Structures are given as structure tokens and as C-alpha cells.
Amino acid sequence: MQSLYAYFSKKEGDVSRAEKTMLKHFEEVIELNLMIIGLLVEIVKYADNFYKEGKKKHFPTNLDLNPNKRFIENPIIKRIFSDDKLMNRVNKVSAIWLQNDLDIIRKIFVKLYNSDLYKNYTFSANDSVEIDKKFIVDALNDYILNNELVHHILEERSIYWIDDLPFIATIIFGSIKDDLSLDNRKVFKDMSDKDFALGLFRNIIIHNHEYEDIIVRFAINWDLDRIAIMDQLLLKMAFSEILSMSELPIKVSMNEYIEIAKYYSTSKSRLFINGLLDNFVKTYIKEGKIRKVGKGLI
């Protein structure tokens, strides 16, 4: 969607270059994954130093002398630090969190340290690994990845990363819960995913005018110029999947783009896309213009 928006906005017409740019953005998602892990690593390092400095106070408290280190001794954290290959890759990108004047590591740790989440976890009698996993996931979700300074730094690196962040977070959370390595080096699960992305991208460019005619046909009392570019793109992507991908169920495509519209469009746009797609599908099925292979796909 982002790459199509850039392609049609620039009106360059060089599909090959646009495809290469899109694939480059896909590759950068791996760097984003490493940067998130790197951020967590730097927060843990800061916490370790925080505990050590507490012992050096002139009048240390009992808590200063005997800090609760459950956070830095969390088995998920230990697994990250013991993975030499992962740490080597993380260290190459994590400097971005330190080379700025935002003091972001300290600010995040202080907020986390003073939270009920941190207190409940570190003083909990429940020492199960499931509690350890849940704490890391909740800390990332509630105190790290939603931080405005984090978003600011990520946006400076890539304008796409804020949109990619929930996707990467879901992968990291899943890896933690399922005891999988966080050293994810694959952009695609398999090559069919890459082929799907390129096929969708090319099909929309090739059939752009045809899909615009469909929008005009079913957008009753609406001129194409009055419909938001993003709404047009979402509709064209849905048309492409429904009309050209014979093994993909119609309901999957419709639900996917209605969900995406919830994130990128207004409530009115969402209703508009939902209604237009529904009308389009019903009409094209009656006219025999939608062909799917297999049962239950229509």
C-alpha cells in the first residue's frame, strides 16, 4: 500500500525501480526488529548499572544494597545476551538509542521502574517462566514501544517504521511466548509471500484504469477525484486479490481491507469501502466475472 501510494504520487512509470524500492523497504524491517531488541538490551544494561550505582550512595538503603534483580535476570533477557550472533547484530544498530540528546534509555527505565507492572513482577512470589515472558511482553507493549521518543527516533530512520512497528512487535511477542529465537533474518516465511507481494503490486499498476472504472461504477454519486487516494488504493488492492488471485477466498480479501481501512481511513471511509466492496462482489458474482478455484472461496 505504501509503495503503491509512492508510485502513483510520483507518476514516474518505472515499475522495476518501484519494485526494488518496495523490496528494500521489506528488507529494512529486519533492521527494525534488531533495533527493538537493541532498545530492550540498552534498557537492561542501564538497569544493571542503576543497581550498581545504588550501592555507592553515601547512605544506601537496604534496597540499594540488595536490589531486586529479577528484571535483568529474566530468562528471556539472559537468552538474548547469551546469543552471541544476535548480540553482534544488535550491537551494530543499537547505538542509535545512545547517540542522541533525548536521554531516552534513562527516561524509559525510570518510568518502567516506578510502574506497578515492575513492582508487581519483581516482588511476585510466582517465579514461573510464563510470568517472566508476560512481563517482558507487557513492558515492551506498555512502556517501550508506545513511547513518543521511540517513535520520533524510528521515524527519523524510516518514515515506514511506525506503520511496521505493530507487525514487528507481534512477531517479537510471538517468539518470546513460543521460546523461539529473536534473531529473525527472514523477511518472508517463504518465497511465495514475496511472489504474492510483487504480483499484487504489478497487477494493480497494470489494471489501474480498469480498477478506477470499477470504483466509478459502484461509487454512486461520487466522482473519482472526490475519493481519497488511500481509499482508492485499498479498493484497488481488494479488486486485484478478488479478480486475479483464484485460490484466495473472497471473504479473506474483503475482511483484510476492511480491517486495514480501520487503521488508515476515517470511520466514514471505512463504511464507504465496506459498502462498495460488498456491492462490487455481489454484482460481479452475478455477472460471472469472479472466478475462484475450489469450494467455499466465493
Image (tube, rainbow, N blue to C red):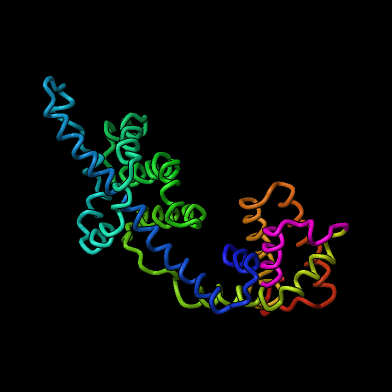
In the image, is residue 164 part of the stretch drawn in magenta? no
Relative to 37, 223 lies left or right: right
Image quadrant holding the N terminus, namely bottom right
Residue at (36%, 29%) from the top-left corner? 116
In the image, is residue 232 part of the stretch drawn in magenta? yes
Identify the main secondary structure in magenta.
Answer: helix
Magenta range: 221-240
Relative to 112, 196 lies left or right: right
Residue at (67%, 58%) from the top-left corner? 230
Residue at (75%, 71%) from the top-left corner? 211
Q: Quadrant of residue 212?
A: bottom right
On screen, residue 286 above or below 234: below
Extreme residue in the top direction: 59
Query: As rendered, which of 50 and 64 lies closer to the eye?
Result: 50
Query: As rendered, which of 78 and 147 lies closer to the eye?
Result: 147
The image shows residue 102 at horizontal and vertical percentages of: 35, 40
Q: Quadrant of residue 58?
A: top left
Residue at (18%, 38%) from the top-left corner? 49
Res 297 visible: no
Relative to 290, 32 lies left or right: left
The image shows residue 221 at horizontal and vertical percentages of: 88, 57
On screen, residue 107 above or below 95: above
